[in-house]
Amino acid sequence: MRFLPTDEQSDFARTLRSLLGSAEVPAAVRAWADGDAGPARAVWSRLAGTGLFALAVPEDYEGAGLLPLELSLGFVELGRAGVPGPVVESAAVSVLLTELADEALAKRFLPGLAQGGAPATLTLPGGSPYALDADAAHCFTVSAAGELRLAAGHGARLGSTDPARRLSLPPAGGGELLAAGPAVIRAAGVAGRWARLLTAAQCLGVGEALLARTVEYVKQRTQFGTPIGSFQAVKHRLADTLLDLEFARPLVWAAALSPGPGEVAAAKLAAGEASYRAAMTALQLHGAVGYTEELDLSLWLRKARPLRDAWGSPSACRAEVLRSLTPARR
Amino acid sequence: MELAHTADVEAFRAEARTWLRAHVPARPLPSLETAEGFAAHREWEALLHADRWSVVSWPEEYGGRGVDIVKWLVFEEEYWAAGAPGRVAQNGISLLAPTLFDHASAQQRARVLPSMASGEAIWAQAWSEPESGSDLASLTSRAVRTAGGWLLTGQKTWSSRAAFADRAFGIFRTDPDAPKPHQGLTYLMFDLRAPGVTVRPIGRLDGKPAFAELFLDQVFVPDEDVIGEPGQGWRIAMSTTGNERGLTLRSPGRFLAAADRLVGLWRAQGDPSDTALRDRVADAVVGARAYELYTWANASRFAAGAAIGAESSLNKVFWSQYDIALHETALDLLGPDAELAEGEWAEPWVFSLAGPIYAGTNEIQRDIIAERLLGLPKGRR
C-alpha cells in the first residue's frame, strides 16, 4: 500500500505544469472563445509532445496503454491551466473505440487521437445532448439504441455560460454509421465513466487554480489599511476551500486506480462541488474586479459550474454512489 | 500508487476480525459517560489487553504488538466495523501516550504505559481552564517548586471523563515571570485522588457527567511525574495536539462504520421520494471514503518519514463537521424517534456536537490552515 503518486507520476504532472505555465493558455482560451482555434491547437500540440493523449490509447495503436491514473494527474494540470477544447471527450472517444475492439475503427481513429492531431467529441445516452466543440473536432454520437455514428458536420452553435465551451446539437440521425449493438452501449458506458473521471480531475485543477489566484490576491489587496487576507472571515473561506480540495483529491486518485461506477461518481461529486465552491469564494474575495471578464480569473470562474455538471451532475453522482453500494461494505 | 495491502497486512486483518467476532459484546455496553458504563468499558479494555489488542501500535514490552500505522488503521477499521465499544482509555492512549513515547524517560514509560494499556488506570486530559480554552497559553494554574516535586494550585475544566478517571495530565505555569505566555509552562501528570484535588462532575448537554472541573489546592506531584524539562511544557503539549486533531483520535474506521449504519437506516426507513435526504446519505458515504483515503495518503507520507504538521488542522475540521452532518442525517431519517434519548443515535449526535469545539475550536483550526498552509498574514482574530 502506497497511496501517493510515484516520483515518475509526480514528475509527469510537474512537466505538464511547467509546459502549460509557459504556453500562454489564457490567450488561447480567449481566442478559442472568439472562434480562433489556432492558439489552442498549438497548446494541444505541445501537450501531445508529452505523450498525454497517448495515455488513453492502447499500445497497439501508437498509444501508451490505457493509464487512468497518469491521465488523471495530467487532467488536473489541464484544469489548473484552463486548457480549452474537447480534451475530456477526445480521451473518452479513445476509450470507447478501444473498448469496442473493432480493428478497422481502431486503426482509423486511434493513432490520430494518440498523437493529439485529431481531436474528437462525443455525446452519449444519459449525458448532455450538446456536443462540446463539435466545430473543431470529429463528432461521435451514440444513440439510445446503440448506434455509434460519426456526425456529418455540426448543428448550429449554442452559447454556453462559459464562452470557451462551444456547444451544438449533433445533426439528428445523420452521419456515418460506425457500429451498432449492445457492444456499443457497453463501450459507451465505460467511456462515459472515463469522461466523468477526467472531468473530476479537471475540476480539481480548476479549483486549485482558483484558490491559488485568490490567495495571491488577498495577500496584496488592502482595505482598511491592511491586506484583506489578514481578516478572519476571508481566511476561513479560503481554509474551507483548501479543505474541500484536499479531501476531493484522494477520491480522484482512488477512482483512477479502480474506475468503478461508485468510486468515479464519488470523485466527480467531491471534485465538482469543491471546484464550484472555490469559484464562489474566489469571486466573493476578489470583489467587483472578479466580476469582470477582463480579469483572467473569469476563465476559471466560468468553467467551474459547467464542469461540475458535465458528465454527471452532483445529483446523478450521488444516486450512483448509493446504487453502487453492496448491502455489506466488506 | 497502490491501495491494495500486502498479504501480511490482510492476515493481520483476518486475525483481528476473528478475535473481535468472538469477543465484542453482543449487546451494547451502557454509556461510558455514566459510572456503570465507565466500569463496563474498563472491563472491556482489560479484555482487549489480555490478548494484546488494546494498543496494537505500541511496542510489545508495554502490551502492544508493535505494528505500523497501516496495520493500526486496518485494526481500527475492523474494530469499528465489528461494532466494538467506544474506548474509555482513549485520552491516555491517543494523547498522553504519544507524548510519553516522544518526551518521557524510559522509567516513566515503564511505570505509566502498562497500566494504561490494561485499562487499570484511565487518564483524563486537564488542559482547559475557565479563562483558557483555545487560547491555551493564557492558562494560570500554577505548579510551585517544593522538596522533591511540585505543588499544583488552580482550576481545570471541561476535562473529558475526569468524573470517573484515575489520573490526569496537563500543563501548568511554573515561571509566571517568563517573557511570553508560551514559556514557563511545565507538563506533568497527577493523581485525581491525591489530597487537595476536588473533582466536580459537569453534565454535558444530555446531562451525562461526561466531563468535570478540577479544583487543585496544593496538590503534590513528585519530580518523577514531570514529562520532559520544566519550562518546556508548551512545546511538548503541541506535539500532543497534532495527534489529537490528526488521525489517531479519529481513525477513519469509526466513520466508515457509522456511514454503513446510516445507509442501513436509510434503507430501512428512508422515504425513496425524499431525494434531499438521499443526497445527504450519499454525502455521508462519500465523506467517509474521502476521510479514509485522505488518511491512507497521510499514512503513506508518514511511512515515508513525514511528520504530522498543520495538515492535522484540515483533518480536524473535516471530521468534526462530517460527524455532525452524518448524525443530523440519521436524526432526520428517524423522524419523531430522533428525540428519544435512549435511541442508538442520540448520544453519538450529542457527542458529535462537541467536535468543532474541542481539540482547538474550528475557528482556530481555520486560522492555522490559512496562515500555515496558505501563507496568509496573521491578523485580526
Image (tube, rainbow, N blue to C red):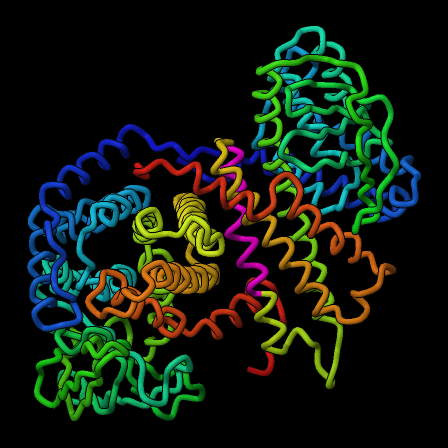
Where's residue A198, x and y in %? 63, 36
Magenta segment's dominant SS is helix
* Residue at (66, 28) in percent of width and height: A92
Judging depth in this view, the residue of B108 and A49 nearest the camera is A49
Residue B15 placement, left or right of A202? left
Residue B231 in which image quadrant? bottom left
Q: Is residue A256 magenta?
A: yes
Relative to B272, is A212 above or below? below
Please give the range of residues in magenta: A239-257
Q: Quadrant of the N terminus of chain A?
A: top left
Q: Quadrant of the C terminus of chain A?
A: top left
Residue B239 placement, left or right of B337? right
Where's residue B300, x and y in %? 42, 43
* Residue at (48, 61) in percent of width and height: B314
Relative to B302, is A46 above or below? above
Judging depth in this view, the residue of B206 and B7 nearest the camera is B206
Tell which residue pokes out farthest to the top in this image.
A104
* Residue at (42, 55) in percent of width and height: B307
